[in-house]
Amino acid sequence: MTAALARSLARSPCSRTAFASAARTFTHTAVARRDGAADDAPTHFGFKTVPSSMKETLVRNVFSSVASRYDLMNDAMSMGIHRLWKDHLLRSMAPAPNTRLLDVAGGTGDVAQRFLEYQDKHHGGGASSVHMVDINPEMLAEGERRFAGSTWEREGRIAFSVGNAESLEFVDDCSVDYYTIAFGIRNCTHPERVVQEAHRVLKPGGRFMCLEFSRVENPVLATLYDMHSFHVIPRLGEVLAGDRASYEYLVESIRRFPPQDEFAQIIRDAGFTTIGRGYENLTFGTVAIHSGYKF
Ligand SMILES: C[S@@+](CC[C@H](N)C(=O)[O-])C[C@H]1O[C@@H](n2cnc3c(N)ncnc32)[C@H](O)[C@@H]1O
């Protein structure tokens, strides 16, 4: 048995009960996460240092402020390229029929919709479903609006929960086939806890996939990217959304997130098995898809 496999099994208490309860239909739950004493260790919020216990609230405020303009701003900031990155995420996942996705930090539902469209196109829909989780009720409400009245909603194939990626106590152990987090993990106070939770909730054989801004290695492109990030994006935030500060935070938070290889190691440390180096760079490393299997 390899060390990675032994580590993975040690962290996979997939009991019979967990498998049985995984068959239950998702319901809409409002979950407020608070697990005890405030954590006052310093952490970053963009380029500022704040107590860990404050970061969750600050991040929630950022996304409350941008929720109604989030989709418009995403298109404007990335010149529509975020759609291609998300399409690529789904093509790389190539989900099997009748599977269940947990889309964490799901926001307005771009990844959830692509998963359901993929299932309809390639597998005739079937019993596949998505459970979207987000810490911010306003962002999740935008997602709910997107699916309101859809066949997916009528068939009970989409569910929504307010919750923190670091503590998904309302999701059973070993209950989902795929876990995605797109442009969400860099906002979390303890990314390593997020990955450990992903490992807990995935079934054996399940797959973790993270789409996140990353590091551009080519120095010329990195300079151009910095100019776009620090000058164009905050200005777009000011003009299109009347909110420069939130977009400054979004740019700064990208620079604070660990580079590709360091994050791949966090994923392996949580017990996942990665293939090769564990990630794929897109658009010169502007974003990367990290992936790991629970065996
Ligand atoms: C940049 S948006 C990405 C939304 C969507 N996944 C997408 O790709 O368009 C980041 C999302 O992460 C959510 N978020 C931030 N911290 C979170 C946490 N600790 N747990 C769950 N969601 C979180 C925010 O509320 C926001 O909806």
Image (cartoon, rainbow, N blue to C red):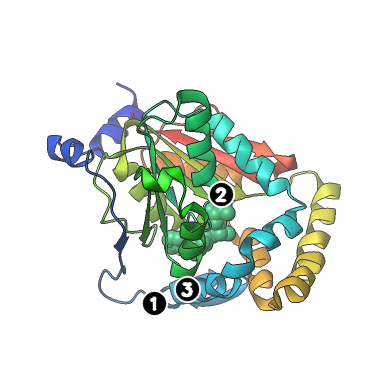
Cα gap from disc 2 to disc 1, whole angstroms: 34 Å
Q: Is mark 3 on a helix, strand or loop?
A: helix
Say few, some or many: other residues with alpha carbon within 10 Å of mark 1 (under 14 / 14 to 19 / 20 or more).
few
Mark 2 or mark 3, which has the lower sequence index? 3
Mark 1 or mark 3, which has the lower sequence index? 1
Between residue 50 and residue 25, name the one nearer to us. 25
Q: What element carries label 1?
A: loop
Residue under label 2: 110
Mark 2 or mark 1, which has the lower sequence index? 1
* Residue located farthest toward the left when viewing the structure as drawn: 17
Q: Which residue is drawn at 42% across and 65% down?
A: 135
Residue under label 1: 40
Residue 183 in view here: no
Q: Nearer the viewer, mark 1 or mark 3?
A: 3
- Taking the image as shown, residue 105 lies to the left or right of residue 224, namely left
Considering only vertical position in the picture, is 197 above or below 281? below
